[in-house]
Amino acid sequence: MKVYRIVQHRYIHACPNFPDGHAWRTSRQVVEVVESGPCLTPITLPGPGAVSIDCARRLREEHRCENCRVSIEVVRISLHVIVGGAAQ
Ligand SMILES: [Zn+2]
Ligand SMILES: [Zn+2]
């Protein structure tokens, strides 16, 4: 399984609709990618000059082989609190 470790950045501010504050924007930063091995169940395309492709290019996540699945781990949530009337 290929693992993306990410830091999620949440930008918090308070505005008339959400006086207690809310996340008006979130973004993700990939900090580490743990590669898995090659595809275990490559698919051979029909036609001349048999070409095989990773199952990830054809199948939905749940049907892929173990190596082609992707997992996202949030390692940290970073809060950016904007105090006192942001321009937003
Ligand atoms: Zn707001
Ligand atoms: Zn695969």
Image (cartoon, rainbow, N blue to C red):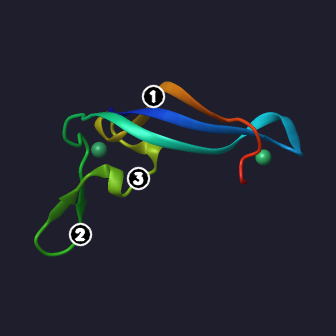
Using the numbered discs, state the Cα–Cα distance from disc 1 to disc 3 in whole angstroms: 22 Å
Residue 79 visible? The answer is: yes
Callout 1 environment at 10 Å: few (<14), some (14 to 19), or many (20+)? some
For the point 24% across and 50% down, the residue is 42
Residue 73 is marked as 1
Position of 63 compared to 12: left or right? left
Residue 59 is marked as 3
Q: The C terminus is located in which quarter?
A: bottom right
Q: Which residue lies furthest to the left in this view?
A: 49
Residue 66: percent from left, percent from top: 33, 34
Callout 2 environment at 10 Å: few (<14), some (14 to 19), or many (20+)? few
For the point 54% across and 29% down, the residue is 78
Instruction: Report the residue marked by disc 2.
Output: 46
First in sequence: mark 1 vs mark 2? 2
Using the numbered discs, state the Cα–Cα distance from disc 3 to disc 2 in whole angstroms: 16 Å
For the point 19% across and 41% down, the residue is 38
Which amino acid type is marked by label 2?
A: Pro
Q: Residue furthest top?
A: 75
For the point 48% across and 41% down, the residue is 28
Which amino acid type is marked by label 1?
A: Glu
